[in-house]
Image: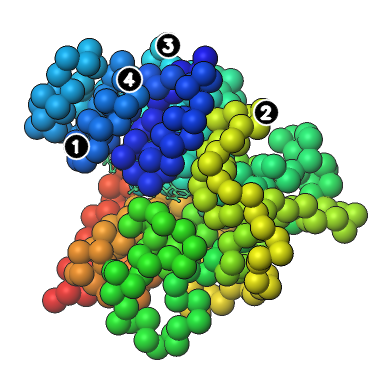
């Protein structure tokens, strides 16, 4: 019986994880669930899965949840310390890291430091802390499995022994596919005026609002390039982004002998979640089998940095190294939130990020504290730029 903690249980990934777990009560038991604010939804999940612990974002939310789950014997807590506890508890084996954004860094790192099996959806945590996070995984013998559909596809397509050196193991390119999001074919001049609702309407995936906007700017792919660099030890020249609007091929690995291995499937996150939960076994996920004959033609394009400047900013941050990806991530989080609140326009997102990357010098990332200090500086700088844009 594998005991599971889900960080971010009320989100899109959290809900898909619970859906897969519910199909296999003989294999998995839920140890703990967390949510930030959606207390009623978390209470529903608590009634269904009867975890030992539940963690929410505030004292007020904890009091409301305690009332809703009274009598179930669930210990209810709030705050970051409690998140770190449920991620590192001796009573859990596996941690699904599905909090969105930098808020997930501390508990995800706590899980790695406790040597857990970490199922990583929270790409922002790895983008921020790359080397430090991977060092913690190695030092504490944690198992890190990618949930991001592309990285899960790459992981399934890589050769044995890639961890030491992907190129020596025969990898010529990691082909990271991207849908191109809702604005792939929209006239670039009209992007200034798109609304949050339009930006969140992803053609293939139903996801949280932040990652939906990231998909529309393609910052999501930029963060994923950095994520792939750390997960697979791949230099940036080895990673190529390919736009594939149908999201049927979830990514590919091209080998020196000319072979290309791909992982295909319906666009449903329950597939990578089930893969990582059961790895190296295979379990049912609830996702229908792919019907190849019902599929339309598959298309592939090169990404256009004029249309998607955020992708270029991310490649630049990876090239700069050190705390540059943490600055990029923090600036993006603030800009996306501000766009979602209708304070700035869609194209202002890349302007804010570029402004922060110019204004805040990046440096080495010797500790998590140093990374968090740079994260705070970038957030302050982003807010100042947003104030200027609005005045
Ligand atoms: P979501 O917005 O649907 O859910 C986010 C979860 O995090 C919620 O449970 C919320 O309560 C919690 N949360 C939010 N802010 C918090 C905070 N400050 N402190 C603690 N908890 C907080 O997001 P999602 O779409 O499920 O994405 C989660 C993560 O998975 C993101 O990092 C995203 O990039 C990644 N991801 C998502 C998908 C997808 O299909 N949704 C695919 C690949 C990767
Ligand atoms: Mg992805």
Taking 121 as reference, is 260 above or below it?
Answer: below
**What residue appears at the point 66 percent right and 62 percent down from the top-left corner?**
240
Residue 368 coordinates in the image, percent (x, y): 40, 34
Say what secondary structure mark 4 lies in: loop
| Residue contact at pointers 3 and 1, CB within 8 angstroms | no
Tell me which label, 2 or 3, sits earlier in the chain. Answer: 3
Give the residue at mark 4: 51
The CA span between labels 4 and 2 is 25 Å
Q: Nearer the viewer, residue 61 or 345?
A: 61
Tell me which label, 3 or 1, sits earlier in the chain. Answer: 1
**What residue appears at the point 67 percent right and 47 percent down from the top-left corner?**
154
| Residue contact at pointers 1 and 2, CB within 8 angstroms | no
The CA span between labels 3 and 1 is 28 Å
Report which quarter residue 302 is drawn in.
Answer: bottom right
Give the residue at mark 2: 280
- Quarter of the figure that contains the C terminus: bottom left
Closer to the eye: label 1 or 2:
1
Note whether residue 70 is visible.
yes
The CA span between labels 4 and 3 is 15 Å
Tell me which label, 4 or 2, sits earlier in the chain. Answer: 4
- Few, some or many residues within 10 Å of mark 1 (<14, 14–19, 20+): some
Residue 183 coordinates in the image, percent (x, y): 45, 76
Q: Is residue 95 left or right of residue 257?
A: left
Q: Is residue 293 left or right of residue 35?
A: right
The CA span between labels 2 and 3 is 23 Å
Say what secondary structure mark 1 lies in: helix
Give the residue at mark 3: 90
Taking 297 as reference, is 131 above or below it?
Answer: above
**What residue appears at the point 80 percent right and 56 percent down from the top-left corner?**
260
Tell me which label, 1 or 2, sits earlier in the chain. Answer: 1
- Few, some or many residues within 10 Å of mark 2 (<14, 14–19, 20+): few
């Amino acid at each position: 019986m594998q005991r599971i903690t889900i960080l971010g249980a009320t989100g899109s990934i959290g809900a898909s994880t619970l859906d897969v777990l519910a199909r296999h009560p003989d294999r998995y038991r839920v140890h703990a669930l967390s949510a930030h604010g959606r207390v009623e939804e978390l209470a529903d999940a608590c009634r269904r899965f009867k975890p030992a612990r539940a963690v929410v974002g505030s004292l007020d939310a904890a009091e409301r949840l305690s009332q809703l789950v009274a009598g179930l014997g669930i210990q209810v807590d709030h705050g970051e310390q409690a998140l770190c506890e449920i991620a590192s508890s001796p009573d859990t084996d596996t941690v699904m890291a599905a909090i969105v954004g930098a808020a997930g860094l501390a508990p995800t790192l706590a899980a790695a430091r406790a040597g857990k099996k970490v199922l990583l959806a929270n790409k922002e945590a790895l983008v921020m802390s790359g080397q430090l996070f991977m060092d913690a995984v190695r030092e504490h013998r944690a198992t890190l499995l990618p949930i991001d559909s592309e990285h899960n596809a790459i992981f399934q397509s890589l050769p044995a022994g890639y961890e030491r050196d992907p190129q020596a193991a025969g990898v010529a390119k990691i082909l990271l596919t991207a849908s191109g999001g809702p604005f792939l074919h929209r006239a670039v001049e009209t992007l200034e005026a798109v609304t949050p609702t339009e930006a969140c309407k992803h053609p293939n995936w139903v996801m949280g609002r932040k990652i939906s906007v990231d998909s529309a700017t393609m910052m999501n792919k930029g963060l994923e390039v950095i994520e792939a660099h750390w997960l697979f030890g791949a230099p940036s020249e080895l990673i190529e982004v390919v736009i594939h609007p149908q999201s049927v091929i979830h990514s590919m690995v091209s080998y020196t002998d000319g072979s290309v291995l791909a992982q295909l499937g319906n666009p449903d996150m329950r597939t990578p979640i089930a893969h990582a939960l059961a790895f190296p076994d295979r379990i049912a996920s609830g996702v229908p089998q792919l019907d190849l004959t019902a599929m339309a033609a598959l298309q592939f394009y090169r990404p256009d940095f004029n249309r998607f400047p955020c992708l270029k900013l991310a490649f630049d941050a990876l090239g700069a190294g050190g705390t540059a990806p943490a600055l990029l991530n923090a600036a993006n989080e603030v800009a996306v939130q501000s766009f979602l609140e209708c304070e700035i326009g869609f194209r202002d997102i890349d302007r804010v990020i570029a402004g922060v990357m110019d204004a805040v010098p990046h440096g080495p990332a010797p500790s998590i504290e140093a990374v968090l200090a740079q994260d705070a500086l970038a957030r302050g700088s982003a807010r100042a730029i947003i104030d200027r844009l609005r005045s």
